């Protein structure tokens, strides 16, 4: 899994903020970084030539920090998340998760993961779905059961433990998936547009719920999204990416207080709109370039 | 449930009415147009009355003193064939599952095996049966000696394994990418992924395949009995009694009915199996 020679063409253009230690107010600076990304590239070979999904990306996510990745379709934000999760390997550069290579972190169960699809196993009850990672990793039956009960209580689905996933609404399924991701109390959560398929009202509700869960668990989160307000509402920092090749265009600090202090009222706060504007400008480029923000949900 | 029973009974009754109705209305020698028989003969040799068949089933098999009633002999033959078919079914389903697992695990195995799996079904069964018997008869390991019924079971399994291997391959490859990614993120190996994800996800594909396999196993067993010449089964009985059809036309219909019962029992067993696996038959959720 050693990094091969850097293959990225040095075609950096536009303002790329160096990913050195950014100044987020509520980061725990003492612990090792949750995620370190150094000069990472990912190319996909295709019949019509190589496609560069990611080019020379640098990023540091500190322990306990909530970082969103946002950008137009094809900017490689999901690819970056998959690289962190060791669901894919970079073609250049180096990644570490808590100071370890991603595949080691994966074997150590250092992170929990949630996707756009809830991905619940339909033949298992809600409870058994939450228990799945614990069961696979050899946790005893009683401990599993207790943990699942606790988590389902946390996401407000205690009464649905014995239901089947197909009896739940999309929002509820997604909350089960989040409970499952939290099952082993990971210190890093990787989320790939987990609320992308939900309607607006459900979405705001689960966003607030995620903030609360995160405040309680203190986990770092890497969160891929299409939505600027969602990114601003949830994050300590928003990483704005640009497409073809996928690069980090700018990192916008949000600084709207710690996760536990954020409530729905924040959505109508002037500071919130201010940060939304900052992210939008970063996406579109200050030079007024058009088309960059395509595919980004501006709700 | 009750409606199903009524529908089933109505189906049987309709068949009986059609049989007797045709026999009543059609001319004895059938309908012949320009030398071609377009509708079958309806005389008592070709189409005995249903009640004659029933009466014959209650009568002894032969006129020899102490002969058992025909229905009992047919029942024993049917049970024998069912047993052989069941052995063939179990072997076929096992081999089919193993083949599919191998093909799912190694892509090279899929490209190497799948064409042969398909090709295997183009070999005519009648041609295969004597070969299997001859190969089998050369097998002798210690106290184990090859029996003819084993050849029949092998042929039944040969027909049964095909739908299972194809269906299971589809089923084992059916999990969503998100599920495969999820299990990978848990750092579990191939075997755990297979047992917690692939196998349960394959059930909706497997059940119809297993039902087809049961039907194939019964047909395979009946036909192989005839071409191998195995005594004691229902296939052989149909041929034997058919030879004396002109003298005793109602007699051969008993083993034919017996063969139908064997098929029904096999299908029923598959329904029970589906019931047991009911919780894996849910449609996929997002």
Image (tube, grey):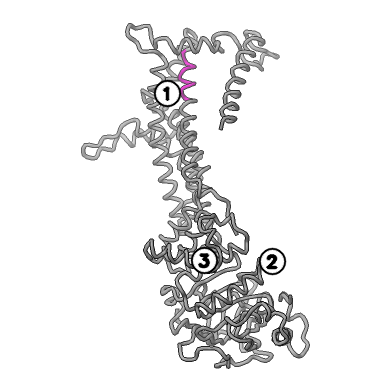
- Mark 1 is surrounded, within 10 Å at the Cα level, by few (under 14), some (14 to 19) or many (20 or more) other residues, namely many
Q: Position of residue A57 (x, y in %)?
A: 58, 85
Q: Give the prevailing secondary structure in the magenta stretch.
A: helix
A27 relative to B130 in the view: left or right: right
Residue that numbered label 2 is attached to: A199
- Please, what secondary structure does the residue beneath circle 2 have? loop
**Vertical comparison of B72 with A201: above or below:** above
Quarter of the figure with residue A136: bottom left
Q: Pick the residue in front: B96 or B240.
A: B96
Q: Residue at x 48, y 75 (%)?
A: A111
Q: Is residue B254 magenta?
A: yes
Residue that numbered label 1 is attached to: B234
Judged from this view, the residue extending furthest toward the left is: B142
Q: Which of pointers 3 and 2 indicates the residue nearer the eye?
A: 3
Q: Residue at x 57, y 73 (%)?
A: A191
Residue that numbered label 3 is attached to: A153
Are the numbered discs 3 and 2 placed on the same chain, yes or no?
Answer: yes
Magenta segment, which residues? B251-259
- Mark 2 is surrounded, within 10 Å at the Cα level, by few (under 14), some (14 to 19) or many (20 or more) other residues, namely few
| Callouts 3 and 1 close, C-beta under 8 Å | no
Quarter of the figure with residue B224: top left
**Vertical comparison of B71 with A200: above or below:** above
Q: N-terminal of the two: label 3 or label 2?
A: 3
Distance from disc 3 to disc 2, alpha carbons, whole Å, reads 23 Å
Q: Pick the residue in front: A177 or B89.
A: A177
Q: Position of residue A95 (x, y in %)?
A: 50, 83
Label 2 lies in what chain? A
Task: Tell me, for residue B208, which label it has, or none.
Answer: none
């Amino acid at each position: 899994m050693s990094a091969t020679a850097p293959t990225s063409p040095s075609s950096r253009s536009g303002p790329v903020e160096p990913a050195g230690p950014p100044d987020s107010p509520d980061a725990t600076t003492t612990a090792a970084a949750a995620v370190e990304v150094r000069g990472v590239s990912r190319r996909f070979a295709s019949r019509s030539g190589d496609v560069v999904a990611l080019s020379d990306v640098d990023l540091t996510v500190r322990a306990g920090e909530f970082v969103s990745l946002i950008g137009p379709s094809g900017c490689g934000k999901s690819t970056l998340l998959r690289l962190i999760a060791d669901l894919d390997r970079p073609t250049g550069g180096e990644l570490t998760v808590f100071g370890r290579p991603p595949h080691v972190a994966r074997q150590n169960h250092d992170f929990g993961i949630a996707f756009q699809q809830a991905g619940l196993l339909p033949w298992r009850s809600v409870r058994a779905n939450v228990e799945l990672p614990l069961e696979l990793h050899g946790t005893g039956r009683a401990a599993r059961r207790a943990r699942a009960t606790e988590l389902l209580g946390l996401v407000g689905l205690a009464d649905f433990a014995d239901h089947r996933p197909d009896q739940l609404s999309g929002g509820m399924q997604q909350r089960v998936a989040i409970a499952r991701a939290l099952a082993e109390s990971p210190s890093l959560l990787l989320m790939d547009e987990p609320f992308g398929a939900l309607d607006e009202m459900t979405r705001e509700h689960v966003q607030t719920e995620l903030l609360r869960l995160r405040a309680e668990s203190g986990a770092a989160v890497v969160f891929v999204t299409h939505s600027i307000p969602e990114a601003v509402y949830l994050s300590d920092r928003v990483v704005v990416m640009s497409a073809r090749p996928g690069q980090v265009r700018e990192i916008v600090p949000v600084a709207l207080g710690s996760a536990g202090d954020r409530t729905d009222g924040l959505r109508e706060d002037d500071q919130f709109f201010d940060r939304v504007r900052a992210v939008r400008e970063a996406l579109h480029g200050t030079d007024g370039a058009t088309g960059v923000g395509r595919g980004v949900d501006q709700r | 449930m009750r409606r199903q029973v009524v529908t089933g009974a109505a189906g049987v009754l309709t068949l009986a009415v059609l049989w007797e109705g045709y026999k009543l209305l059609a001319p004895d020698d059938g309908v012949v147009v320009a030398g071609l028989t377009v509708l079958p003969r309806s005389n008592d040799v070709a189409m005995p009355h249903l009640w004659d068949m029933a009466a014959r089933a209650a009568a002894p098999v032969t006129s020899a003193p102490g002969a058992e009633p025909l229905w009992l002999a047919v029942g024993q033959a049917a049970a024998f064939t069912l047993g052989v078919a069941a052995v063939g079914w179990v072997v076929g389903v096992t081999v089919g599952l193993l083949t599919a697992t191998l093909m799912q695990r190694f892509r090279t195995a899929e490209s190497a095996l799948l064409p042969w799996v398909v090709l295997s079904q183009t070999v005519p069964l009648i041609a295969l049966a004597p070969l299997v018997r001859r190969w089998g008869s050369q097998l002798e390991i210690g106290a184990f000696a090859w029996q003819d019924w084993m050849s029949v079971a092998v042929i039944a399994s040969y027909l049964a394994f095909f739908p299972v291997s194809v269906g299971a391959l589809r089923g084992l490859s059916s999990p969503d990418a998100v599920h495969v990614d999820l299990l990978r993120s848990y750092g579990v190996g191939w075997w755990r992924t297979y047992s917690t994800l692939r196998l349960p996800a394959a059930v909706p594909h497997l059940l119809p395949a297993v039902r087809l396999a049961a039907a194939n196993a019964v047909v395979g067993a009946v036909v192989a009995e005839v071409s191998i010449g195995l005594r004691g089964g229902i296939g052989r009985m149909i041929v034997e009694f058919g030879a004396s059809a002109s003298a005793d036309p109602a007699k051969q219909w008993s083993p034919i009915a017996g063969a139908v019962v064997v098929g029904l029992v096999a299908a029923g067993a598959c329904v029970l199996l589906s019931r047991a696996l009911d919780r894996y038959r849910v449609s996929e959720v997002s």
